[in-house]
């Protein structure tokens, strides 16, 4: 049925999931900018040469909050949704033996955490913090794919430090990333991959507070079942690596972290020049962080 739709209308399917953003959220939440779980199977793989577009809807739900010792505390629930619109341009330009890749992501979100109370509340769908990756190098060999990039999260989303209903996080972030996909055989059917992103945050608007640095690692192990289907196990980990700075920081609370385990299925759509992706995660071993589930629905096409 999907293949019968006009080519121009197919990217709108994932965006339609935004209509589900009707709930509100109220719970504690401490995070950086990078969304975990955005990269699954073959995470270091980039599209073919040229311009590609991806629409990805991420829905996160949690009803358990963990303290610094991993114990369940508090009450309330989180229902957070984001729709990411990403343009990727794989250029023919070579640098250090690899292709230069450019990316831009414009997220539409329904909530972002407050820096003081760390509460989360829905205020409808609005522009979040835009991500730009002006430098990403991509190297490919028979058995390896490698990426290395530098990106910036811009402070573009609406933010007020006295409000619980923010769309932006109130600070900018610099990000360095490194990814690897490995194929054990020349058939490239089995594969495993990991992509790490290290974030260095700026100061929060209107506060003497700088969030601690953190690292996000996405991983996947899977197999191409045939020319159309790719499936496997995926997961992620998020760990804060430094204390918050400034007079308004809460470093005495300790670091935050969580891990997640899940599965992904991906179907190639040659008529679109892309594929359809679905992956889901269950979080565990959380501390100073919610513990919930995440669903990712993605659709990418080539121009």
Image (spheres, rainbow, N blue to C red):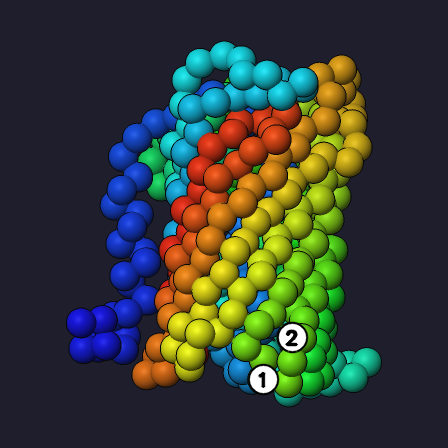
Query: Which one is nearer the viewer's eye here, 120 or 125?
Result: 120
Q: Is residue 48 left or right of residue 56?
A: right
Q: Residues within 10 Å of mark 2 (few under 14, many from 20)?
A: some
Tell me the SS state at disc 1. loop
Using the image as rendered, state which of residue 219 and residue 222 is in the foreground. 222
22 vs 88: above or below: above
Residue 200 location (% of width, % of height) = 75, 43
Q: In the image, is 82 to the left or to the right of 196? A: left
Instruction: Name the residue furthest top.
Output: 74
The residue carrying mark 1 is 187
In this view, 69 is above or below 291: above
Residue 303 vs 212, above or below: the answer is below
Q: Are marks 1 and 2 in contact (CB under 8 Å)?
A: yes
Residue under the point 58% across and 80% down: 188
Numbered marks: total:
2
Q: Foreground residue, 48 or 204? A: 48
Q: Is residue 109 visible?
A: no
Q: Secondary structure at mark 2?
A: loop
Residue at left offset 22%, top offset 71%: 2
Residue at mark 2: 183
**155 or 87: nearer the viewer:** 87
- Rate crowding at label 1 as few (under 14), some (14 to 19) or many (20 or more) other CA atoms within 10 Å: few
How far across and how far down the image is residue 79, in percent?
38, 32
């Amino acid at each position: 049925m999907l293949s019968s739709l006009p080519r121009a209308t197919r990217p709108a399917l994932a965006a339609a999931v935004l209509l589900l953003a009707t709930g509100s959220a109220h719970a504690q939440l401490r995070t950086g900018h990078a969304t975990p779980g955005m990269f699954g199977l073959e995470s270091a793989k980039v599209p073919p040469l040229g311009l590609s577009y991806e629409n990805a809807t991420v829905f996160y739900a949690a009803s358990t909050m963990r303290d610094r010792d991993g114990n369940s505390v508090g009450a309330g629930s989180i229902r957070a949704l984001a729709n990411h619109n990403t343009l990727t341009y794989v250029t023919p330009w070579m640098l250090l033996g690899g292709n230069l890749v450019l990316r831009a992501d414009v997220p539409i979100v329904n909530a972002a955490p407050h820096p003081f109370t760390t509460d989360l509340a829905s205020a409808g769908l609005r522009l979040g913090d835009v991500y730009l990756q002006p430098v990403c190098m991509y190297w490919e060999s028979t058995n390896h794919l490698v990426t290395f990039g530098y990106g910036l999260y811009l402070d573009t989303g609406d933010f007020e430090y006295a409000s619980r209903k923010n769309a932006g996080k109130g600070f900018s972030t610099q990000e360095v990333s490194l990814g690897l996909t490995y194929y054990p055989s020349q058939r490239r059917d089995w594969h495993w991959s990991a992509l790490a992103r290290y974030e260095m945050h700026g100061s929060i608007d209107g506060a003497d507070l700088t969030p601690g640095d953190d690292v996000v690692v996405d991983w996947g192990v899977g197999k191409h079942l045939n020319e159309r289907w790719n499936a496997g196990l995926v997961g992620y980990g998020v760990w804060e690596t430094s204390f918050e700075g400034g007079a308004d920081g809460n470093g005495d609370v300790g670091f935050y972290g969580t891990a997640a385990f899940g599965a992904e299925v991906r179907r190639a759509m040659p008529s679109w020049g892309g594929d359809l992706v679905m992956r889901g995660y269950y979080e565990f071993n959380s501390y100073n962080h919610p513990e919930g589930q995440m669903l990712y629905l993605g659709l990418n096409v080539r121009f």
